[in-house]
Amino acid sequence: MTVSEGRHAAAGSLRLGGTPPEALPAHRSVEEILAHPDFPAARALFVAEHARVYEAGTFPAQLGADVGRVTALAILVCLYAAHDPADRATWPTLNRLKDTVARFGFASPRLIDDFVARLVQTGYVEMERQPEDSRVRLLKPTERLLDWDRAWMAAHYAPLDLLYPEPGYGPPLRRDPAFQAAHAGAAPAAFDAIIAMTWSNLEIVFFLSATSALIILLSLFEMGATDPEARIREADLAPLAPRFGVSRTHIRNILSVAQERGFVVRSGPRNAFITLTPRWSAAFDRFIADSLVQSDLTYRLALRAMGIAAPYRS
């Protein structure tokens, strides 16, 4: 899907209805997060936690950890938690999963078909018979998938807890199953906001779509490549290839595209040294802050679903 198609899909999803912004609970803002003095530490933690998902040999990287598949996993858990057996429109079927993932703009129906088949084969998803209609099979996450979802949920809240330890984000960090169920069931109310946030970060969208592209650039960021005096060479990125299950050619291609888009510059003899530009740093920080805003929103939706008032302290 192209950027223009993705923007159109996102706009269309917002026109379809969903939760009006005024019905969402008060939550933290991008400006508040970016202005926090501990944001650099939260950014580093965000990168470290997210890198784990893309490491070769781990789930879901072993099945392909591009953003389309990772998004599909999260949505699958949410659709099952939020469905009402008495309401056919909410049943977490394969077609409904494909339709919902398509709204985010990162995965084709065929990719989801293949991915779900592999999830079933590897024991992360079960095809559950729907008692109301024996012809229908629901996509049910197994405990293996729910265990991953709790870890991934905790990874999203660790940076927020670093920024705002009082009152903190205890339930997701404890991987509390009751909170997980409420969080997954409440999350669809935030889907429109998440879609709009994603496609508002157009500088980052391409690197979300390409396999491991974003995490490779984030790793470069953490290596100090925003410092013009850094002496980072392409060869220094070689360990990232086996770590994230990609080829060195793939890394080279990512760097080439990043350079074309003004995110990377080369300098020194034979352009040997790599530096990330301030343009990349600003886009990256905005994307992280936006992501943390959506996590905070979903956290408050989950607590509201549990009948718990979410304290808000700056």
Image: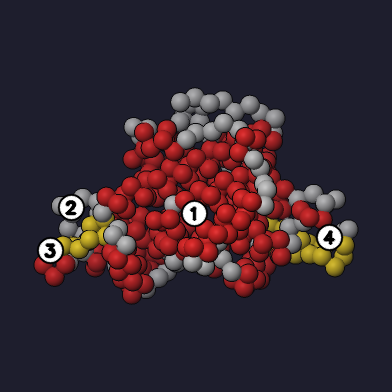
Q: Position of residue 99 (x, y in %)?
A: 67, 62
For the residues carrying marks 4 and 2, which lies nearer the camera in this image? 2
Q: Position of residue 39 (x, y in %)?
A: 36, 38
Q: Residues within 10 Å of mark 2 (few under 14, many from 20)?
A: some
- Reading the chain from its start, which is encountered first: label 1 or label 4? 4
Residue under label 2, please give it. Answer: 228
- Reading the chain from its start, which is encountered first: label 4 or label 3? 4
Q: Residue at x 46, y 26 (%)?
A: 314
For the residue marked with disc 4, what is the amino acid?
Gln
- Reading the chain from its start, which is encountered first: label 2 or label 3? 2
- Residue 66 is left or right of residue 17, and the answer is left
In the rendered structure, find residue 268 and report the number of the disc placed on it.
Answer: 3
User: Disc 2 on helix, strand or loop?
Assistant: loop
- Reading the chain from its start, which is encountered first: label 1 or label 3? 1
User: Disc 3 on helix, strand or loop?
Assistant: loop
- Residue 108 is left or right of residue 265, and the answer is right
- Tally the marks: 4
Which colour assignment does the render follow?
A: secondary structure
Q: CA distance from mark 4 to mark 2?
A: 59 Å
For the residue marked with disc 2, what is the amino acid?
Pro
Q: In this view of the protein, which residue sits in the foreground, 309 or 56?
A: 309
